[in-house]
Image (cartoon, rainbow, N blue to C red):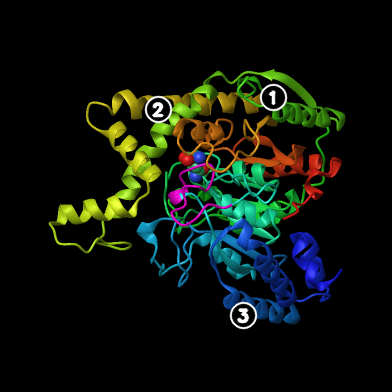
Amino acid sequence: MKTNDLYEMTISEASLLLARKEISSVELTKSVIGRIQQVEPKVKGFLHINEVDAIASAERADKRIQSGDFTPMTGIPGVIKDNMCMTGVPTTCASKILENFVPPYTATAVQKLIDSGAVLVGKANMDEFAMGSSTENSAFHPTHNPWDLQRVPGGSSGGSAAIVSAGESLFALGSDTGGSIRQPAAFCGVVGMKPTYGLVSRYGLIAFASSLDQIGPVGKNVMDSAMILNVISGYDPMDSTSLRSLENNNTDYTASITEGVSGMKIGVIKEMFGDWVDAPVSDAVMKAVSQFEDMGATVDWDVSLPSTKYAMAAYYILAPSEASSNLARYDGVKYGYSWDGEGSMWEGMENTRGIGFGPEVKRRIFLGTYALSAGYYDAYYKKAQEVRTLIKSEFEEAFKKYDILVTPTTPTLPFKLGAKLSDPLEMYRSDLCTIPANIAGIPAISLVCGFSEGLPIGLHLMGGALSEEKLLRTAYSFEQATNWHDRTPKI
Ligand code: GLN
């Protein structure tokens, strides 16, 4: 392999060569930086690039490898979505209100990567405060889909997915509140996983909707995603929603990944295959399900989870309600942008928030404030919580019968930049299939299961709470039996 091709490697390939000292992390990191210089003007996946720091941490990684004190992630270049805090590195959430914010602390998931010796190259673009499905809500610039630069990469972790797809990093972290890791992974033809709620610490993740937010891996394939999850998962006393049961848990998510799907029961959720799903998408997903049958799984093609069709409606009450409360802290007093005109405290706050937040963020704050207000709380917020309980219990029942449930990741192929910007409801529909997993707190993964018009299609697998090993094993078997994940975009 030529040195300038190193950026094309997966984590497992690079990790092996690093351990054998056949390549160095500095060489690998320089190759990734070269690739960034080559394609980033077209992809625009980054908000911040740390070239100098990246080389310095690659040098430290090489020393660790020389001394024999290293992990499978030591020396591997990666990227962090720009809503995760990193001491001394700008963290903007793609918002003007945090444009100059430099956090004094590091998110636990990011710290775990640093401790493992991963080389963090930069911060990825996203929809402002993770609200959106196309990365067009970034206050700075949109990101382009590496498979077709006229199209969106999905969102809100569109920067993370586009960067991995374009070879500008070997992996990335994203965050997923209603689909923001899985939907862009599907649009960019990479693997994206939302772990069980509480498996990965949210400490240092800038809050959108705290009961739904979860950090997860974006990788070139399933094995890489498992390797990333190995590092970032685990109990964290700094996050009150982190699962205590994981305190002494050292699960290796790669250990049982090759065990196959023979004997597994797989269910297809019929409510997630309406006429609103494009034909090439449902065809590819159905073919993928047949593939599982060929590999020895039993398939029930007609599983009904009737309440999942209300998941999106419930989400657009719950998520904005939590956001309206979480975003109250951006008042121009504590940190972030502060309007410096003449006026009262109230005018100061109004102008700070009026100028600092973009239109989608304001829409969510309005929605949430309305849903939580006296007189409407019972009709909206409480009702949505009840729907949430119903959806959760339907999944619990279903997972007594099935190991894995299948849906498309997205109803459509990646759409053109600008196509859905003027119609928020159309944009919201991009997450119809991914939202139920956040509502239920269960793990889910998206991987490529086909192409149409040269654009990737995502297969969406969900498992019961803490069934990550089974989920990864199922996804891995599919990947081994197909070669979709080997394709890379020509940029
Ligand atoms: N697209 C959804 C939204 O805008 C989900 C976002 C996310 O998962 N962060 O709310």
Residue depicted at 41% across the width and 55% down the height = 95
Image quadrant in which the C terminus is located = bottom right
Q: Is residue 336 above or below residue 454?
A: below
Q: State which mark lies toward you, 1 or 3.
A: 3
In the image, 77 versus 46, the foreground residue is 46
Q: Dot 1: few (<14), some (14–19), or many (≥20) neighbours within 10 Å?
A: many
Q: CA distance from mark 1 to mark 3?
A: 48 Å
- Of mark 1 and mark 2, the one earlier in the sequence is 1
Give SS at disc 1.
Answer: strand
Residue 384 — which label? 2
Left or right: 305, with 377 as reference point: right
Residue 140 falls inside the magenta stretch: yes
Question: Residue 15 at x, y = what percent?
Answer: 77, 66
Q: Is residue 301 above or below residue 261?
A: above
Q: Is mark 1 within 8 Å of ligand 1?
A: no
- Of mark 1 and mark 3, the one earlier in the sequence is 3
Q: Tell me the residue that label 1 is attached to.
A: 268
Q: Are marks 1 and 3 in contact (CB under 8 Å)?
A: no
Give SS at disc 3.
Answer: helix
Give amino acid for label 1: Val
Answer yes or no: is residue 230 visible.
no
